[in-house]
Image: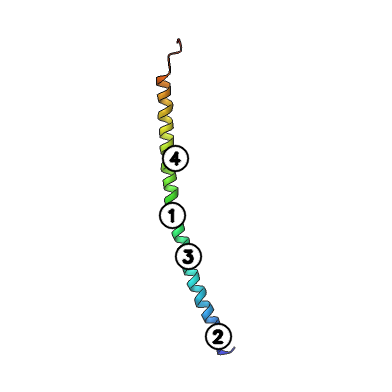
């Protein structure tokens, strides 16, 4: 194997290692963002359920008696 070919392979390997590190950082950052979004969605769903339950109980209390 010639020295030039070995240097070319080592250079390509170094670039690939840098690319893998960069891609790993992107994936890691995306996972953090996904976790934040899932937490926010859970809060919104919980809040919506609470509001829905409050609305249903308010409608029952405000309903006229059956003999009306």
Q: Quadrant where the C terminus lies?
A: top left
Q: Which mark is residue 45?
A: 4
Secondary structure at numbered mark 3: helix
Earlier residue among tags 2 and 1: 2
Task: Name the residue carrying label 1.
Answer: 33
Secondary structure at numbered mark 1: helix
User: Within 10 angstroms of label 3, few (less than 14), some, or many (20 or more) residues?
Assistant: few
Task: Name the residue carrying label 2.
Answer: 6
Residue 21 at what x, y percent from top left?
47, 69
Earlier residue among tags 4 and 2: 2
Q: Quadrant where the N terminus lies?
A: bottom right
Q: Are marks 2 and 1 in contact (CB under 8 Å)?
A: no
Earlier residue among tags 3 and 4: 3
The Cα–Cα distance between marks 3 and 4, rounded to whole angstroms, is: 31 Å
Q: Are marks 4 and 2 in contact (CB under 8 Å)?
A: no
The Cα–Cα distance between marks 3 and 1, rounded to whole angstroms, is: 14 Å
The Cα–Cα distance between marks 4 and 1, rounded to whole angstroms, is: 18 Å
Task: Name the residue carrying label 3.
Answer: 24
Earlier residue among tags 4 and 1: 1
Q: Are marks 2 and 3 in contact (CB under 8 Å)?
A: no
Residue 8 at what x, y percent from top left?
55, 83
Depicted 54 relative to depicted 36: above or below: above
The Cα–Cα distance between marks 2 and 3, rounded to whole angstroms, is: 27 Å
User: Who's the residue at 50% across and 70% down the image?
Assistant: 19
């Amino acid at each position: 194997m010639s020295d030039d070919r070995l240097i070319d392979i080592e250079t390509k390997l170094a670039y690939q290692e840098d690319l893998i590190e960069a891609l790993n950082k992107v994936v890691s950052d995306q996972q953090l963002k996904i976790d934040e979004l899932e937490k926010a969605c859970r809060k919104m769903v919980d809040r919506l359920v609470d509001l829905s339950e409050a609305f249903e109980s308010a409608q029952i209390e405000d309903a006229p008696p059956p003999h009306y």
